[in-house]
Amino acid sequence: MASLTDRYAVSLLRVAAKDKKLEEIYAHVLGMTDQAEKLDEQTRPEILTEFLKLVPPSDLHAVFLKFLRMARKHLGLLDISVFSAAPLSEAQTINVKQKLAETFGSKISLVYKVDESLLGGLRIIAGHSVIDNTIKKRLADMKKNVYRGVYFKQC
């Protein structure tokens, strides 16, 4: 049996798709935090404003996560996560998004996160593909190669 969270998410998806506003609703929900009352009501689509009146605030985050997963599938978007050691500038973000769109197709959903442990470079996860061009990965590879060389010289 579907949970109440699932029912809310499915309802929002159906209404947004029926009104041909799924991409707009998706973009707004993607930018939202679980603190919905802090959002500017004038820029929020009416469908979303009415929906927020129905969903208990404690369930909102789970409903939005479920909605986003279903909307990406419905829209045919590929989830791509980009991790960098430091925040990218707006120009860098646009450049990365353009390159990824060229590589994986124009329908992508980009999630960007800062991970200071990477030291530098980018890690990109797209479906089952991982592109790891980080300093952390390069150092790990160098360490492995050094140990491999030491091991073979002793034998």
Image (cartoon, helix red, strand yellow):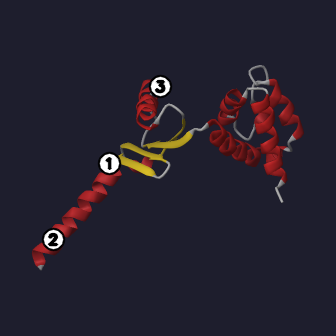
Q: Of helix, strand and loop, which one carries label 1?
A: helix
Q: Earlier in the sequence, mark 1 or mark 2?
A: 1
Check disc 1: other Cα within 10 Å, few if <14, some if 14-19, many if 20+: some
Horizontal arrangement in the rendering, residue 124 relative to residue 34 (left or right): left
x and y percent of residue 120 in the render? Answer: 36, 43
Name the amino acid type tagged 3. Answer: Glu
Pick the front one: 138 or 5: 5
Q: Quadrant of the N terminus?
A: bottom right
Tell me the residue at 30%/58% (across/down): 140
Is residue 143 or residue 70 the one in the foreground?
Answer: 70
For the residues marked 1 and 3, what is the alpha-carbon distance in whole angstroms? 22 Å
Residue where numbered disc 3 is placed: 90
Which residue is drawn at the image coordinates 17% and 74% (left, top)?
151
Between 14 and 63, the one lying in front of the other is 14
Q: Quadrant of the C terminus?
A: bottom left
Task: Look at 78% across and 19% down and name the residue there.
Answer: 42
Residue 146's quadrant in the figure?
Answer: bottom left
Looking at this view, name the residue that lies furthest to the right. 54
| Mark 3 secondary-structure assignment | helix
- Give residue 91's quadrant in the image: top left
Q: Amino acid at mark 2?
A: Val
Give the residue number, with chain letter if any, for mark 2.
150
Disc 3 residue crowd, few under 14, some 14–19, many 20+, Cα 10 Å: few
Give the side of residue 24 with respect to residue 116, left or right. right
Residue, disc 1: 135
User: Where is residue 12 drawn, in percent x and y?
Assistant: 79, 38
